[in-house]
Image (cartoon, grey):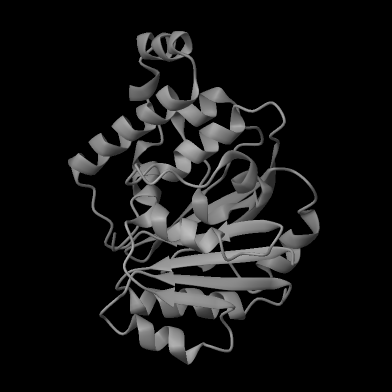
């Protein structure tokens, strides 16, 4: 199995259906779909049941948040690469995976471009050709368009559930600081992220900043961390708006 797509959901039945339809419309069929629902009460369970022959594995039960749900999905995958496509997000077109699959060779991460949909407006976001420390301090991989080699979760652990909205960021930092971890940009639009209804609550921005700082503190030496603090590295994100939008998932 080449690809495992993990979709987590909580009370977003409409978005869940849209995401599942996007996956089953793909011309590339060497994939599995894992759906983890947080015991929704809005009809999401009925949606899941109606696609029982298209979903490889599903469960609907209470969880402890975004990263607990994603960890449950990780444990059920058999694919070489994992893509997290959460409820409401869709692949950019039916040929997306057919185009990208042949490019998935042996890098740790393959990351593409993203379209952000908000109030009927589409915003194109192009990922950089190279990932370095400066990029990770200012931005992050955009979860709906990064293909993660499954072995990374075995070698470096799954998502840290202490984080509320930046657990994926901490995982990326944890991996990218290892010399053997590699990445490659695929210059194609992978997914359309549903940004409708996402709050720009300043408290969320404050939490994001503190969690990103915590991620670095957990993964670098005290000397490096203090140097980054002196440079105000954690307060200068030029991508804060889109990072906050993408990392604050709906319904959680």
Is residue 89 among the parts visible in the rendering? Answer: no
The count of marks equals: 0
Visible in this render: residue 154? yes
**At which x and y percent is residue 118?**
35, 60
The residue shown at (68%, 48%) is: 151
Q: Quadrant of residue 36?
A: bottom left
Q: Is residue 42 left or right of residue 105?
A: left
- Location of residue 11 with respect to 99 vertically, above or below: below
On the rendered image, what quadrant is the N terminus found in?
bottom right
Task: Please tell me which residue is depicted at 34% across the width and 44% down the height of the picture.
Answer: 244
**Nearest the eye: 166 or 155:** 155
Q: x%, y% of residue 35?
A: 48, 72
Residue 222 drawn above or below residue 120: above
Residue 229 at what x, y percent from top left?
36, 14
Q: Position of residue 128 (x, y in %)?
A: 60, 37
| Above or below 166: residue 87 | below
192 sits to left or right of 241: right
Q: Residue at x 54, y 71 (%)?
A: 34
Residue sitting at 37 percent across and 56 percent down?
66
| Quarter in which the C terminus is drawn | bottom left
Residue 176 vertical position relative to residue 123 in the rendered view, above or below: above
Q: Quadrant of residue 197?
A: bottom left
Which one is nearer the viewer's eye here, 63 or 6?
A: 63
Q: Nearer the viewer, residue 197 or 154?
A: 154
């Amino acid at each position: 199995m080449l690809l495992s797509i993990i979709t987590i959901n909580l009370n977003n039945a409409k978005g869940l259906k849209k995401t599942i339809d996007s996956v089953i419309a793909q011309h590339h069929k060497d994939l599995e779909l894992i759906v983890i629902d947080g015991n929704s009460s809005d009809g999401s369970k009925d949606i899941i049941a109606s696609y029982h022959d298209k979903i490889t594995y599903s469960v609907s039960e209470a969880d402890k948040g975004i990263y607990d749900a994603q960890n449950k999905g990780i444990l059920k995958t058999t694919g070489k690469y994992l893509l997290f496509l959460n409820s409401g997000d869709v692949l950019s077109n039916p040929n997306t995976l057919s185009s990208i699959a042949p490019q998935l060779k042996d890098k740790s991460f393959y990351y593409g471009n993203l379209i952000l949909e908000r109030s009927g407006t589409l915003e194109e976001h192009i990922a950089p050709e190279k990932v370095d420390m400066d990029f990770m301090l200012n931005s992050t991989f955009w979860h709906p368009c990064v293909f993660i080699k499954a072995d990374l979760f075995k070698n470096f652990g799954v998502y840290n559930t202490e984080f509320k909205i930046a657990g994926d960021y901490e995982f990326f930092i944890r991996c990218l600081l290892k010399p053997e971890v590699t990445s490659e940009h695929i210059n194609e639009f992978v997914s359309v992220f549903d940004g409708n209804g996402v709050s720009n609550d300043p408290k969320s921005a404050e939490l994001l900043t503190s969690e990103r700082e915590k991620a670095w503190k957990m993964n670098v030496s005290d000397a490096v961390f203090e140097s980054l603090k002196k440079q105000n590295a954690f307060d200068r994100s030029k991508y804060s708006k889109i990072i906050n939008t993408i990392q604050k998932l709906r319904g959680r």
